[in-house]
Amino acid sequence: MKITTDLSHLVNELDLNAYANKVQEIHQMIENGDGAGHEYLGWLHLPSHISEEEIDHLEKTASYLRENYEILVVTGIGGSYLGARAAIEALNGVPAHQKPEIIYLGQTFDPEYTSCLLNYLKDKKFAVNVISKSGTTTETSVAFRLLRELLEKRDGKEKARKAIVATTDKEHGALRTLVEQEGYDSFVLPSDVGGRYSVLTPVGLLPIAVSGINIRELINGAIDAEKDTTTPSIKENEAYKYAVARHYLYSRKNLKAEFLISYSPFLVQLGEWWKQLFGESEGKDHKSLLPVSATFSTDLHSLGQFIQEGSKIFFETIIHFEKYRQDISLPFDEANLDGLNYLAGKSLSYIQEKAFQGVLQAHYESAHNDNIILNVEILDAYHLGYLFYFFEKSCAMSGYLNGVNPFNQPGVEVYKANMFKLLGKPGSK
Ligand code: PA5
């Protein structure tokens, strides 16, 4: 198992056996595709079904964009950009030294952010990957029109065409129509995969490949996660174990929120991706956990006080890495004015591990918070691919345990309808 779900820091022991039948039943429902939202189960066996032809097209397009442009503007919102951003920042860091630079638009109407970004781009050689399943999301469409206008006015239609790659539905939506009319290179987001489950489709894979990450390793990790989570056995399926623990803490202990905690500033966007996955999948029928993310040590000096002594409405899920790709040791200093010589020669991985253990003691033993620990060997492309799939599978199980359809998002439409009416969109009511 590349990820293990450690439940030994729950305040009361969880009897997994009590969930065995229910988990088995939901597992069958997912596999048979006869539960609510079954038309969006395309993610389930996606990793093992990605074709060599598709990977080849992705890698060739990524090489073309890497060789010819200084910047790639990933233009999308929600599931159409969060997975790519999570992977790129997790593996390449922030600020990253990747070429081309990757920046994000299409997730906001903010005039200041948009103006700054367009101003930054105006004399740079940039390409655009516009991503929208529906092809009609207003934030993304507005951003894409601005980017297209900038490119076409500056470089002419032909050069602009070469700088644009679209990822959208095979047949439907305004973006597909634009692709056909303008002759843009394009990728397909399968109609049976929802945005928040799409990181392992071209939606995530193209920008990730452009950033220089090896997408084959990412896919291999996801393939292994797919294999490892095919068992309905609650004792052996680590993704289901996590889903069951969440459900138990929500329904039996009446906890209202889950903190997803990492110890790396590079994982802030992974937290954003995870919040969307669980928030949009489960927040229905006036139920479900509020997904919140936090980064330690950073947030120990802000939210840490609340977590230790504030309202007891939450539990913590910690992503814990066993090894690191890079490390650094603290040097000895003769003067020792900072009093740190007791740590001289010690690595930051050693110090971080002690911090993790100390925090666990504080939050579990002293504060009596429930803690789930997800142990991951190392943060690399393979394990990140594994982790993406692991969370997707847990989320499906968790949503069904909670009695909701994990694959729709009817609530999101409410703001859109109001906005369209206020903006005077033709046909809005
Ligand atoms: O998960 C989802 O379905 C959503 O977050 C969508 O990805 C998001 O709303 C963007 O939609 P679209 O890709 O149609 O522009």
Image: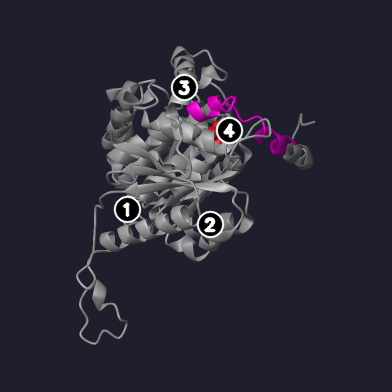
Residue at left offset 39%, top offset 50%: 89
Judge whether 332 appears above or below 371 on screen: below
Residue labelled with disc 4:
282
The yes-or-no answer for disc 2 within 8 Å of ligand 1 is: no
Residue at (31% x, 57% y) in the render: 353
Asked whether 346 or 271 is in front, the reply is: 346
Tell me how far mark 4 sits from mark 1, CA to CA: 35 Å
Q: Is residue 212 left or right of residue 13?
A: left
- Magenta region: 396-417
Residue 206 appears left or right of 216: right
* Mark 4 vs mark 2, CA separation in Å: 23 Å
Residue identified by numbered label 2: 307
- Depth check: give the residue in front, 132 or 367: 367
Q: Which residue carries the number 1 mark?
A: 98
**Helix, strand, or loop for circle 4?**
helix
Residue 211, percent from left and from top: 34, 46
Indicate the amino acid at tag 3.
Answer: Val
Q: CA distance from mark 3 to mark 2?
A: 31 Å
In three-dimensional space, the C-alpha distance between marks 3 and 4, rounded to whole angstroms, equals 17 Å
Q: Which residue is mark 3?
A: 23
Of callouts 4 and 1, the N-terminal one:
1
